[in-house]
């Protein structure tokens, strides 16, 4: 028996003393603010205070807190006049928007509160330095990259600026996230819920010759055991699901897994793209290509196969034959203006802090699904299609990050569905961190060959981009094709190939294909600038015809950092500073079937939509759009999202949420205004404030869809408005047919400047300052837009400098399966950041703004790479720019 105080109240539990404290808090005390994210004490999401000290509860045996005081995020603050008053750190996190998806937020808040209390006791209201804060929070990770706001929040709280009772936030749901009240899929517990676990293949490639789940079913407490093999009974990567069990608890489920009898006939393993591309390599699919998973958001079109290589896909080329011949001729004559290079990018894991998780309750004729999903309505539809059950309701009230990996119906949902159907009870499947980092998706690794030819008068004559993408067992990566959209050239040869290997399947990651393309192309543009002896920004201005980015180039040239830039390799000594630039563009999308329902309910405005908020701020955008239209506080608007049975909402993918939601809300607002204040100007009630009309109104419910630019809104329309418009191209037809997406007019753009310091002794690169110029229109909620842009930069820094999936060459097992092996940026890696929004160029978009998340991360790694070259004269052809690669490059330069 262990006894301690939990949030000030006595708590006793009879449990083995070695049980992790996090399990006691979540499973026995039923407090879910404390999150289980890594299980290894690395991420900090499970942090609690023990006798005032911050500790990670996943590594703390409950026996160690016997007789002590434990405080979770739910217990911070104090009771005052019958109310729970938040801790100053909680109020500061709200005010500074120091969060996005919010899954890691409770751990940050608990640790920062302990730091705050100790700091104030010793230093009063003196402001702590960033190094003080970074040291205190070094054991915490935020995959969304909300670190700049966290710095500001902790400093402000320590200065005493949030000691009062008032608290406000630009983010609608911030209060729930800083108090631990927000419930994610992994926090849900349904009546009778069973614990599901997956038996995964230990082999990189094998035929399953025998599988018997009956021994598992013979174990008391095991309620279901199912095979997860495909029809060919072949596993093609370590970690592929073979079978699964559902039991009354984890220990019993583990016994069930151990009891399953399975036999394998091992086969060859292709652990790398180089091995798979060899002409004598055996075929991974042996002519049976249909089982190959899709690594993209769009459909996989028919392509030829040659061994383990699928392609070429070259539909986006421009005068391909001419480009090929011109570049070949330039190489033959040793044209000094010909730029060539081969660039390699490692795979990047999404590693959302909330793992992939699903709770499925298959009730025969009805299914209830809780899924950590970026597209809850799409996922619900896929469950209905897979199960044959029409009555399916999906829930995703809060989602702890996605970044592209949670768009479709994940394997975890298929497994939970199969187990629930077999058991007749709800079943929970939630990945652990090793599963999340290995089989939950990743940005495919790439090898990109660039050839670029400039003319003597400074034109771009020809461009060739040839990419081999390795998405593991999956296909349909697109990188080279994106180069059709950037830089005006006389001809372009753009070719993509997929190479399949015995590694887990890739999946879309923010701006799929964009960061690897930028890493290669933007460095080639800089090389061309060197050959032409022209300023790199001036060259981009010459070759890039986009009027929005033209304004960004002018902005970038005016920065002090750019004016301080010198020639490449000019600096000497151990620490060398460099400045680099990179640009990018990205289509913005709009989900054409988006609808919202708005109205008045019990004297308050409400807005409802079947979308979800993965941290990008959908709730806030909906509330702020309504509040602005009716001149009321956003906090007075009730927002209902995250359920599939609400009006059709956009996926949280393709940076489409804001551009889809705002026009629909605006259309609905005009309808509602017509109901609240009918008639022409001068009619009765014309001068009455909207707040009074809302308070006096009976219940009203109106639905509207996203209008086209030319749609006339009928304010008195009694029926749903579903006016959508499309651009008539084959590409748009494909998008509409498969995802109800419109491509917008124009593109989002970015021009970014990186200021780095390179340690030439240790090979380390540190980003000192980063400037991000974005043309995405006028942000609806500026602080949230800045937050998302900053987080995108942080993820780009990880891609450039740290993140790399490592595989065992023998069986292709993912070796980087924990946060101690797979390095993502921490708070100490955060540079000084400046985000500049050029607000012009999107006046044609209802609401005036488009998505941020993808365009803001796209050129980051390229800007850093160009800055490294500027600092050292070494061109980094591989990402991440590891210390060993950098030192080897510098050594080669010295020897040359």
Image: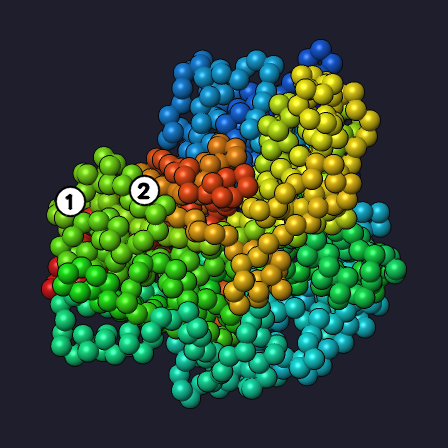
Q: Quadrant of the C terminus?
A: bottom left
* Of callouts 2 and 1, the N-terminal one: 2
SS at badge 1: loop
The answer to which of 86 and 313 lies nearer the viewer is 313
Query: Circle 1: is it few (<14), some (14-19), or many (20+) Cα within 10 Å?
Result: some
Query: Circle 2: is it few (<14), some (14-19), or many (20+) Cα within 10 Å?
Result: some
Q: Is residue 673 visible?
A: yes
The answer to which of 789 and 416 lies nearer the viewer is 789
Residue 522 x/y as whole percent: 30, 57
- Which of the 4 quarters of the picture holds residue 885? bottom left
Q: Is residue 237 left or right of residue 540?
A: right
Residue 335 x/y as whole percent: 14, 71
Say which mark, if any, is on residue 566. 1
Kindly identify the residue that appears in the image at 88 percent across and 61 percent down.
364
Q: Quadrant of the N terminus?
A: top right
Q: Is residue 475 left or right of residue 488?
A: right
Q: Is residue 531 above or below residue 462?
A: above
Are the two marked residues, 2 and 1, in contact with CB atoms closer than 8 angstroms? no
Residue that protrudes farthest toward the top in the picture: 81
SS at badge 2: helix
Residue receiving disc 2 = 551
The answer to which of 448 and 890 lies nearer the viewer is 448
Q: How is the image coloured?
A: rainbow
Residue 845 x/y as whole percent: 51, 44
Q: Is residue 502 above or below residue 483?
A: below
Kindly identify the residue that appears in the image at 59 percent across and 84 percent down.
288
Numbered-mark total: 2
Kindly identify the residue that appears in the image at 44 percent across and 61 percent down.
513
Say which mark, if any, is on residue 239. none
Q: Is residue 194 above or below residue 792?
A: below
Q: Mark 2 vs mark 1: give the one in front.
A: 2
Q: Is residue 587 left or right of residue 871?
A: right
């Amino acid at each position: 028996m262990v006894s301690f105080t939990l949030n000030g109240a006595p708590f006793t539990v009879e449990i083995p003393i070695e049980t992790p404290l996090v399990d006691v808090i979540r499973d026995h005390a039923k407090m879910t603010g404390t999150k289980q994210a890594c299980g290894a004490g690395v991420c900090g999401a499970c942090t609690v205070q023990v006798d005032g000290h911050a500790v990670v509860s996943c590594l703390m045996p409950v026996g160690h807190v016997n007789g002590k005081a434990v405080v979770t995020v739910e217990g911070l603050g104090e009771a005052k006049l019958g109310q729970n008053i938040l801790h100053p750190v909680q109020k500061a996190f709200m005010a500074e928007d120091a969060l996005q998806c919010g899954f890691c937020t409770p751990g940050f808040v608990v640790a920062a509160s302990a730091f705050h209390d100790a700091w104030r006791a010793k230093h009063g209201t003196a402001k702590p330095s960033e190094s003080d804060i970074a040291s205190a929070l070094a054991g915490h990770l935020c995959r969304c990259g909300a670190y700049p706001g966290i710095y500001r929040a902790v400093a402000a709280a320590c200065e005493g600026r949030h000691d009062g009772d008032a608290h406000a936030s630009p983010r609608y749901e911030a209060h729930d996230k800083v108090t631990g009240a927000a419930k994610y899929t992994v926090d849900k517990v349904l009546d009778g819920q069973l614990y599901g676990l997956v038996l995964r293949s230990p082999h990189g490639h094998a035929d399953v010759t025998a599988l018997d789940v009956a021994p598992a079913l013979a174990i008391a407490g095991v309620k279901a055991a199912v095979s997860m093999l495909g029809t060919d009974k072949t596993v093609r990567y370590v970690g592929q699901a073979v079978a699964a069990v559902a039991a009354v608890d984890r220990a019993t489920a583990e016994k069930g897994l151990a009891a399953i009898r399975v036999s394998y006939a091992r086969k060859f393993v292709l652990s790398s793209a180089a091995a798979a591309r060899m002409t004598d390599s055996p075929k991974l699919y042996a002519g049976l290509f249909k089982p190959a998973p899709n690594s993209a958001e769009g459909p996989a079109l028919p392509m030829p196969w040659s061994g383990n290589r699928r392609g070429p896909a070259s539909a986006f080329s421009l005068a391909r034959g001419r480009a090929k011949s011109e570049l070949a001729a330039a190489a033959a004559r040793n044209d000094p203006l010909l730029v060539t290079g081969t660039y390699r990018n490692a795979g990047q894991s999404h590693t959302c802090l909330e793992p992939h998780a699903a709770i499925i309750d298959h009730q025969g004729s009805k299914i209830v699904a809780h899924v950590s999903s970026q597209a809850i309505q799409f996922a619900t539809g896929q469950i209905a299609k897979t199960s044959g059950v029409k009555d399916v309701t999906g829930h995703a009230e809060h989602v702890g990050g996605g970044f592209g990996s949670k768009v479709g119906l994940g394997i975890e949902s298929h497994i939970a569905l199969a187990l629930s159907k077999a058991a007749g009870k709800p079943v929970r499947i939630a990945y652990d961190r090793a599963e999340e980092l290995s089989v939950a998706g990743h940005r495919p690794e790439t090898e990109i060959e660039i050839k670029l030819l400039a003319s003597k008068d400074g034109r771009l004559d020809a461009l060739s981009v040839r990419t081999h993408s390795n998405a593991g067992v999956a296909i349909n990566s697109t990188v080279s094709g994106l180069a059709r959209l950037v830089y005006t050239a006389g001809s372009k040869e753009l070719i993509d190939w997929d190479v399949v290997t015995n590694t887990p399947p890739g999946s879309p990651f923010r701006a799929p294909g964009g960061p690897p393309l930028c890493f290669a192309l933007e460095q080639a543009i800089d090389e061309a600038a060197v050959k032409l002896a022209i300023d790199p920004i001036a060259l981009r201005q010459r070759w890039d015809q986009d009027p929005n980015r033209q304004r960004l180039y002018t902005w970038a040239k005016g920065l002090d950092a750019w004016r301080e830039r010198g020639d490449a390799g000019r600096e000497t000594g151990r620490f060398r500073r460099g400045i680099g630039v990179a640009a990018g563009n990205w289509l913005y999308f709009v989900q054409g079937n988006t609808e919202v329902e708005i109205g008045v309910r019990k004297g308050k405005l409400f807005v409802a939509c079947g979308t979800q908020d993965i941290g990008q701020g959908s709730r806030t955008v909906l509330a702020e759009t309504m509040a602005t239209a009716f001149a009321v506080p956003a906090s007075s608007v009730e927002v209902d999202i995250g359920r599939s049975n609400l009006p059709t909402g956009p996926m949280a993918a393709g940076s489409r949420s804001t551009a889809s939601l705002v026009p629909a809300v605006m259309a609905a607002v005009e309808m509602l205004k017509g109901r609240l204040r009918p008639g022409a100007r001068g009619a009765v009630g014309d001068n009455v404030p909207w707040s009074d009309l809302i308070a006096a109104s009976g219940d009203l419910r109106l639905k509207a869809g996203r209008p086209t630019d030319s749609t006339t809104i009928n304010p008195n329309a009694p029926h749903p408005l579903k006016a959508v418009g499309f651009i008539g191209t084959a590409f748009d037809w494909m998008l509409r047919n498969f995802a109800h997406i419109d491509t917008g007019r124009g593109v989002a753009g970015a021009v970014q400047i990186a200021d780095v310091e390179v340690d030439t002794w240790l090979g380390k690169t540190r980003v000192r300052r980063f400037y991000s110029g974005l043309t995405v229109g006028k942000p609806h909620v500026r602080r949230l837009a800045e937050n998302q842009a900053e987080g995108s930069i942080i993820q780009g820094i990880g891609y450039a400098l740290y993140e790399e999936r490592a595989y065992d060459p023998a069986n292709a097992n993912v070796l980087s399966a924990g946060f101690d092996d797979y390095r993502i940026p921490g708070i100490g890696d955060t540079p000084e950041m400046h985000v500049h929004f050029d607000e012009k160029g999107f006046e044609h978009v209802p609401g005036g703004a488009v998505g941020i998340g993808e365009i803001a991360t796209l050129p980051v790694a390229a800007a850093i790479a160009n800055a490294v070259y500027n600092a050292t004269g070494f061109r980094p052809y591989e990402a991440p720019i590891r210390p060993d690669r950098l030192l080897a490059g510098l050594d080669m330069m010295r020897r040359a």
